[in-house]
Image (cartoon, rainbow, N blue to C red):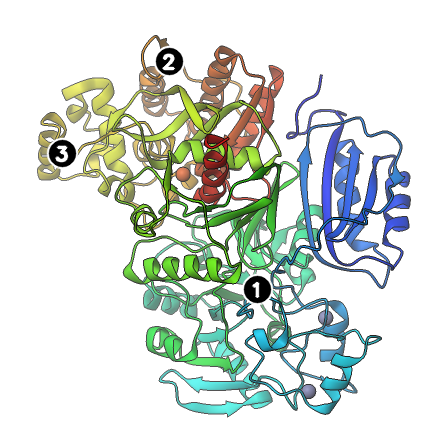
């Protein structure tokens, strides 16, 4: 039996689909792929198309992983990969590996490339004392450098980029015009003589130094424990010495960022390996042309301060992706915190004036330059879960590459959700998903969102037939969609998640969709977030969900897991819940607060009914005494995930009722009371948490059995939790279900826009 496209079933054959863009044609790339596949005993084929090299390989999981790692490591010397996307599809018995006839036809799609990290040749030149670009921080070539972040309009020519203000010097112009040169038509081509230059400003914006001196002084700022604002590729970053607790305390205080993990930039892979565990796939990802932030498990005794990621076993690590970063980190020789230069819930600054006025109270100095950033582009975040790459934030390096689907789509403009917003538009069989735009919690964030919508439409000269939005009437994205004057199609949040993970895996039809997250506007006036949905023709049948509980204080409960917990206790034990004074949850309230909570819940004031698994995680975390209040989204659920000690055999009891709407209702009352008993009898949080994860997967397995579907797709923020995914794969895999998870599109709300496009297209078929 096929064990589906995820998980690590023993010896089961899988199909991996790889799409490579870059200088991979006419350099012996196909024979190399052929030989590599043969050596590993993989079936499949390789094909040149006008858009790039397409590869499909079939074989065991370990060999496929090996193939992927060696594809990048052992590629022909002249080959350069600009982007490499891979995903798992269902096995197709491809047979012996072949080089297929090239696809001559097919339109040369004017795909806008993402920003590509500095290539090896450009890095060598930048570090070569004899080269004319020695120490030049903006060295690039046809194969690397900024793209999406500098394009003003199409076609991609220098006058249409933010490089238009720089007149090429004769030496650069010669390279640019010479078809033999590796900078032939490299639009951002530049050098010391003619290109962008560095400048160092003090915290108030007064110039202090230029060029090399600016770089050296900037390093001195970081070395001295102060904070540096750095203009990079897609916006400003804030840099500080990651080993210096005082510097990080200052950064957190000034940025009003209490505990949320901070990203790190290391000088090179070797230095990362000293602080983190890095396997072959993680190393590939770290050094890939996309160069995302990769979540890695921290080694005991790592060199960095605990303030980087308090109470978190993972570190978010990236490698330098522009010559400027290479120069800085090599000069420093130690890891730096590199977090986005913004105020809470505001977009990252991209202009120097803006940076100085907004970040002047945070940064002690700014290292800036005069190449304008056209489009804000955050660093992407990815992790490897069970041998698969999962993007958690899709921006620099990935956006705006399209997701290809099986059927032609109408022209849809989808506006996404409220948190981690992205937008998307469809043309032909392609869905262009925007870069991560962010949480729409401030006026500035909503403005940035509106700008991004206009920008996307203008860049692609796109006129939608229909605009897709969330069902939530109060979302800024919904309201903006209604103001545009096009036909509007509303898609329920969790249905959008389901269509998003289907598109990510090339699936059609009606699999069982499991859509678990923190919050979404439900169809029955309750807060959804633990839904089982069978998608059909752009609509969904609500098959199952969780027994609701009152979310005391509504939105307020998101920041205070103790409120979710109290609501859950009330749903199970009624008034008695308020007498359970020995529970950490109740101890976290004052007597007055408890009186107020009791009144609210009894009179049903500001206590919407909630079915969300994200909030169940919060509640259990509070009841076990882990987190009563949180300072960033998902913190309590993450604490619960990190507390677990692995996969549990034993699960907690639960009940499933049937017959109403939804058809199956999961009652977790006995789950909760057994957890409380366990805690009281001294069972450790590590064991309770492990059992809780296993129980959730078992609940899902029971619903899957009742559903009659064999294919199960997982989406929603809860599936960023690696342990939960592992439990699902184990418990559903054992019963013969095919479990599909996200790959190129985030499981969180970053994927909502893609799902909205597909649901809308399906509804109009
Ligand atoms: Zn290059
Ligand atoms: Zn020049
Ligand atoms: Fe969601």
Which residue position is annotated with label 3?
597
> Is label 3 in a helix, a strand or a loop?
helix
The disc, 2 or 1, on the residue closer to the chain's N-terminal end is 1
Q: Residues within 10 Å of mark 1 (few under 14, many from 20)?
A: many
Check the image and report above or below for 333 versus 691: below
Q: Is residue 209 visible?
A: yes
Residue at mark 2 to residue at mark 1: CA–CA distance: 47 Å
Side of 664 where 178 appears, left or right: right
Which mark lies nearer to you, 3 or 2?
A: 2
Q: Is residue 619 left or right of residue 420?
A: left
**Placement of 490 over or under 340, stated as above or below:** above
Left or right of residue 138, residue 241 in this image: left
Mark 3 vs mark 2, CA separation in Å: 31 Å
Q: Residue at x 65, y 69 (%)?
A: 145
Residue matched to label 1: 148
Residue situated in front as seen by the camera: 641 or 697 = 697
Earlier along the polypeptide chain: callout 1 or callout 3? 1
- Mark 1: C-beta under 8 Å from nearest atom of ligand 1: no
Query: Residue at label 2?
Result: 663
């Amino acid at each position: 039996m096929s064990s589906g496209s995820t998980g690590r079933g023993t010896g089961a054959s899988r199909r991996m689909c790889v799409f490579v863009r870059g200088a991979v044609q006419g350099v012996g790339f196909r024979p190399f792929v052929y030989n590599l596949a043969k050596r590993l005993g993989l079936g499949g084929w390789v094909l040149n198309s006008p858009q790039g090299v397409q590869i499909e390989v079939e074989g065991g999981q370990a060999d496929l992983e090996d193939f992927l790692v060696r594809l990048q490591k052992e590629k022909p010397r002249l080959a350069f990969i600009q982007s490499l996307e891979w995903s798992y599809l269902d096995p197709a018995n491809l047979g012996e590996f072949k080089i297929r006839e090239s696809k001559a036809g097919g339109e040369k799609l004017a795909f806008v490339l993402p920003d590509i990290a500095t290539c090896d040749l450009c890095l060598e030149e930048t570090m070569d004392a004899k080269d004319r670009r020695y120490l030049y921080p903006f060295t690039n070539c046809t194969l690397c450098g900024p793209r999406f972040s500098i394009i003003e309009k199409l076609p991609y020519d220098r006058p249409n980029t933010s490089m238009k203000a720089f007149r090429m010097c004769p030496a650069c112009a010669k390279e640019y015009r010479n078809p033999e040169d590796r900078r032939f038509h490299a639009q951002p081509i530049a050098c010391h003589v003619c290109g962008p230059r560095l400048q160092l400003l003090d915290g108030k914006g007064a110039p202090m130094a230029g060029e090399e001196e600016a770089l050296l002084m900037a390093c001195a700022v970081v070395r001295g424990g102060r904070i540096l604002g750095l203009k990079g590729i897609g916006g400003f970053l804030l840099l500080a010495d990651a080993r210096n607790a005082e510097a990080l305390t200052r950064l957190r205080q000034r940025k009003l960022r209490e505990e949320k993990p901070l990203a790190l930039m290391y000088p090179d892979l070797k230095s990362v390996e000293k602080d983190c565990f890095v396997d072959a796939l993680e190393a590939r990802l770290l050094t890939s042309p996309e160069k995302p932030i990769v979540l890695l498990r921290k080694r005991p005794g790592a060199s960095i301060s605990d303030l980087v990621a308090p109470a978190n076993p993972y570190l978010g690590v990236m490698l330098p992706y522009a010559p400027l970063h290479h120069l800085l980190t090599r000069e420093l020789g130690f890891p730096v915190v590199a977090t986005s230069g913004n105020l809470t819930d505001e977009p990252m600054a991209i202009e120097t004036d803006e940076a100085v006025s907004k970040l002047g109270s945070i940064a002690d100095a700014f290292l800036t330059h005069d190449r304008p950033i056209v489009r804000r582009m955050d660093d992407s975040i990815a992790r490897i879960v069970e041998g698969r790459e999962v993007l958690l934030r899709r921006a620099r390096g990935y956006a705006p590459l399209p997701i290809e689907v099986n059927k032609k789509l109408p022209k849809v403009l989808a506006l996404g959700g409220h948190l981690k917003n992205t937008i998307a538009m469809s043309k032909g069989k392609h869905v262009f998903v925007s870069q991560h735009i962010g949480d729409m919690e401030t006026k500035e964030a909503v403005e940035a969102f509106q700008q991004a919508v206009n920008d996307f439409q203008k860049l692609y000269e796109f006129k939608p037939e229909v605009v897709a939005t969330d069902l939530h009437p109060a979302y800024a994205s919904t309201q903006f969609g209604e103001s545009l004057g096009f036909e509007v199609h509303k898609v329920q949040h969790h249905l959008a998640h389901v269509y998003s993970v289907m598109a990510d895996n090339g699936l059609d039809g009606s699999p069982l969709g499991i859509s678990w997250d923190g919050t979404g506007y439900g169809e029955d006036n309750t807060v959804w977030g633990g839904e089982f949905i069978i998608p059909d023709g752009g609509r969904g049948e609500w098959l199952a969900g969780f027994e609701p509980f009152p979310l005391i204080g509504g939105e307020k409960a998101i920041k205070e897991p103790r409120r979710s917990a109290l609501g859950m206790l009330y749903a199970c034990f009624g008034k008695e819940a308020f007498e359970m004074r020995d529970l950490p949850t109740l101890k976290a309230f004052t007597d007055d607060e408890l009186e107020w909570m009791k009144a609210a819940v009894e009179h049903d004031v500001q206590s919407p009914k909630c079915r969300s698994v994200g909030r169940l995680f919060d509640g259990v975390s509070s009841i076990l005494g882990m987190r009563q209040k949180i300072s960033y989204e998902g913190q309590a659920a993450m604490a619960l995930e990190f507390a677990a000690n692995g996969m549990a055999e034993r699960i907690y009891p639960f009940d499933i009722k049937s017959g109403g709407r939804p058809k199956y209702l999961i009652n977790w009352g006995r789950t909760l009371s057994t957890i409380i008993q366990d805690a009281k009898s001294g069972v450790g949080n590590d064991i309770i948490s492990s059992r809780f994860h296993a129980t959730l997967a078992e609940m899902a397995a029971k619903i899957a059995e009742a559903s009659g579907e064999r294919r199960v797709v997982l989406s929603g923020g809860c599936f960023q939790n690696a342990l939960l995914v592992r439990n699902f794969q184990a418990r559903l895999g054992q019963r013969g279900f095919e479990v599909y998870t996200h790959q190129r599109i985030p499981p969180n709300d970053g994927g909502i826009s893609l799902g909205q496009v597909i649901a809308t297209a399906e509804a109009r078929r």
